[in-house]
Image (tube, rainbow, N blue to C red):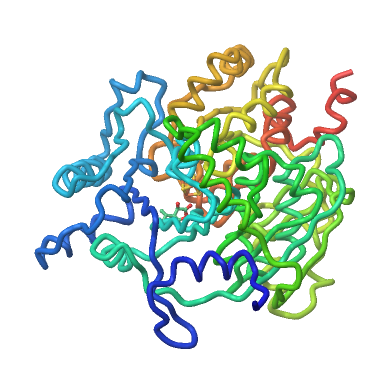
Amino acid sequence: MPQRTLYRKLVDSHTVVRLDEQHVLLYADLHIMNEYTSPQAFSSLREKNRKVLRPGQQLAVVSHIIPTHPVSVAERVIVDPPSALQASNLKRNCRDFGIKLFDANHEEQGIEHIIAPEHGWIRPGMVVLCGDSHTTTYGALGALGFGVGTSEVEHILATQTLVYRLAQDMRIKVEGALPAGTSVKDLVLQVIARIGAQGARGYAVEFSGSTIAALSAEARMTLCNMAVEAGARAALIRPDQTTFDYIRAKAAGLGEQEFRPALADWEQLYSDADAVFDIEHTFSASEVAPFVTWGTSPDQAVAVTAPIPDPAAAADAHARAAILLALQYMGLAAGETMFGLPVDRVFIGSCTNGRIEDLRSAAAIVSGRHVAPTVRAMVVPGSGAVRRQAEQEGLAKIFIDAGFEWRQPGCSMCLAMNDDVLAPGERCASTTNRNFEGRQGRGGRTHLMSPAMAAAAAITGCISDVRTLENRHA
Ligand SMILES: CC(C)[C@H](C(=O)O)[C@@H](O)C(=O)O
Ligand code: SF4
């Protein structure tokens, strides 16, 4: 029996037919859509008079363009005409083709990558597709998830399959315990900084090692979500007891009779001992420090107390130019540290860090303190369920008492497709995943960091070191 990686096992079990050396026709168990990348696919289906083959294996969510004003979900109105049109198109398409939809006024509405796992719809061994790059998130539960292009959405709707080019196998091993004050967000920013924004390009990355095994299911989602920022085509973690417990807790209606046999299958989902990876990296968790991006690419990140790289020390002219451009856009100088840099805005949310554990870790820092008077800070929960739970646990009150805006769920300032935007030149401590130029508003400056670090920035008014926050207030 050839030794196979977990990735290969998932691909093999979903291969309808091998097309050539590089391509297979891949079956999708679940296809998720948003308002942004699906309209053309539906128009094209209508033109050709084609049907959706498996409406029951489709799911649609309004997430990107939705306003997050703190009115009740029932009262939510999309005022911006193009956005309102996208939402109403999705509604009509879902109605006409019989697809389950979470629209603007649905109590469970949220970011696609948050609501799919929290309802137990993502299970180990599945292939999950979505017209969105952060579909890699589902690897946290042992499912092969990845983003597809708008043109592929039509093919998936019509056939429940995708023409898929195979990836190579990469393993990233992380061993040891994460130091106090750090989280998986710091780990993943450090990994991306080390291997580069293209470092995993063309690879399906399997994360393994004792650090990964010790992570909660939600922390694993943060990790797999961000893997795409290193260029990964997929991210995977071997499903284990943590995974099974998470699914058991989330999947309402998954009875013992269904769970037992499924579990027997899920337990087979691992890379064989002698499976060969095309490339391997190893990291030590003990070296992880709170990490912050200084530039305009997720790999331009440093430990909060370390200096920003000096362009003069760059490997070549190309790298030097990239650093200089990023420094200029960000209004920073080489040699500065991120520590102490004043921020105007703080954003806690997104499919990277908008889950309940993220809000708990931010609230733990905020509790009993107040947002600095120079800062506008907001929390945008990842879904209606996250928002409700945070209210029940008293986290919402902690944020509101501290002066945070407590908003309705959505992608919000992760990519500023609604009215949550930075003004030109504004600097934002953000728990999101992309710090590209203008991502949070034209001329806006984004610094990616963990929820605890973003909370610390809100309180102190500047980028701070969450490990020494107590001292700063003493
Ligand atoms: C809008 C969508 C296509 C996009 C993605 O693919 O990731 C968005 O979610 C993002 O985070 O940039
Ligand atoms: S929260 Fe951000 S990264 Fe996630 S799907 Fe929305 S826009 Fe994309």
Give residue 327's position: percent from left, percent from top. 69, 59
Give residue 47's position: percent from left, percent from top. 10, 65
Q: Nearer the viewer, residue 324 or 45?
A: 45
Can residue 66 be seen in this snapshot? yes
Residue appearing at x 75%, y 40% in the figure: 183
In the rendered image, the quadrant that contains the N terminus is: bottom right
Residue appearing at x 64%, y 57% in the figure: 298
Q: Is residue 33 above or below residue 46?
A: above
Give residue 34's position: percent from left, percent from top. 34, 48
Q: Which residue reaches farthest bottom?
A: 21
**Would residue 160 appear left or right of 53 to someone viewing this image?**
right
Q: Quadrant of residue 121?
A: top left
Can residue 430 be seen in this snapshot? no
Q: How many numbered discs?
A: 0
**Would residue 408 appear left or right of 223 to someone viewing this image?**
left
Residue appearing at x 34%, y 23% in the figure: 73
Q: Quadrant of residue 132?
A: bottom left
Give residue 194's position: percent from left, percent from top. 77, 64
In the rendered image, the quadrant that contains the C terminus is: top right
Q: Is residue 162 above or below residue 252?
A: below
Q: Nearer the viewer, residue 338 or 242?
A: 242
